[in-house]
Image (tube, grey):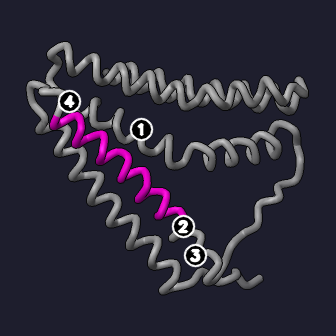
């Protein structure tokens, strides 16, 4: 299963890079949109592979749990990841100046809380998938899935604390 997760992640980034190449180098905007639209299909394929693997009698492992996290994160952050890759592609490949604004103070804190909100969304999606798998797939053992979910729950709380700290202790502009 871990091989499929790695393959899905690699394929995700290959499709993103191909989309950016099509858009900026080949000037084929429609092709780039088609390539970007393939990313959710990669997620669906990973869900299908996970379900088939567990339905065929495989013992639920940490890898199955990681595939669920991958799916939740990919759905919640997908557009943001593409925008990030787009900005990096333009900066490093096309040699355009970065337009990214550095954030400080309350603005930075609000941004971090917004990003934590995406994490909460990824967690909600992943949790729904976890519980559907645990409840309906009749996997041989679901302890590994439950343990991955518990660790992710802890990571979500820690991320929330760190995100909140940016509001409580705002980042200041560095002195020269």
Q: Give the Cα distance between marks 1 and 4.
A: 14 Å
Residue extending furthest toward the top: 56
Q: Distance between the residues labelled 1 and 2?
A: 20 Å
| CB-based contact (under 8 Å), mark 1 and mark 2 | no
Which residue is drawn at the image coordinates 47% and 63% (left, top)?
117
Of residues 15 and 55, the one drawn nearer to the viewer in this rendering: 55
Earlier in the chain: of badge 1 and badge 2, it is: 1
For disc 1, the marked residue is 70
Residue at left offset 35%, top offset 19%: 49
Q: Name the residue under label 3.
A: 110
Task: Indicate the secondary structure of the residue bearing disc 4.
Answer: loop
Q: What mark, if any, has residue 173 been given in the picture? A: none
Tell me where the magenta segment starts and ends, as one range.
114-135
Q: Which of marks 1 and 4 is nearer the N terminus?
A: 4
Q: Which of 135 and 75 is in front in this view?
A: 135
| The C terminus lies in quadrant | bottom right
Image height of 26 relative to 127, above or below: above
Report if the CB atoms under discs 3 and 2 are less than 8 Å apart.
Answer: yes
Residue 173: name its quadrant: bottom right
Q: How crowded is mark 1: few (under 14 residues within 10 Å), some or many (20 or more)?
A: many
117 is within the stretch colored magenta: yes
Q: Name the residue under label 4.
A: 61
Q: In this view, does 128 lie above or below 104?
A: above
Label 4: how many residues lie within 10 Å, few (<14), some (14-19) or many (20+)? many
Labels 3 & 4 near each other (Cβ < 8 A):
no
| Label 2 sits on residue | 114
Q: Where is residue 115 in the image (x, y as percent from the top left)?
A: 53, 62
Packing grade of label 3 (10 A; few <14, some 14-19, many >=20) is some
In reply to whether residue 166 is colored magenta, the answer given is: no
């Amino acid at each position: 299963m871990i091989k499929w997760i790695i393959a899905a992640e690699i394929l995700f980034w290959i499709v993103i890079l191909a989309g950016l190449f099509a858009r900026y180098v080949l000037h084929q905007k429609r092709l780039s949109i088609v390539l970007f639209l393939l990313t959710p299909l990669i997620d669906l394929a990973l869900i299908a592979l996970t379900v088939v693997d567990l339905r065929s009698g495989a013992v639920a492992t940490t890898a199955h749990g990681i595939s669920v996290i991958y799916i939740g994160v990919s759905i919640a952050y997908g557009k943001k990841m593409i925008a990030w890759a787009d900005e990096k592609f333009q900066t490093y490949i096309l040699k355009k100046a970065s337009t990214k604004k550095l954030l400080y103070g309350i603005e930075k804190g609000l941004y971090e809380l917004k990003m934590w909100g995406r994490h909460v969304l990824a967690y909600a999606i992943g949790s729904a998938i976890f519980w559907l798998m645990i409840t309906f797939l009749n996997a041989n053992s679901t302890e590994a899935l439950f343990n991955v979910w518990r660790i992710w729950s802890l990571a979500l709380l820690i991320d929330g604390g760190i995100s909140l700290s940016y509001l409580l202790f705002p980042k200041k502009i560095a002195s020269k």
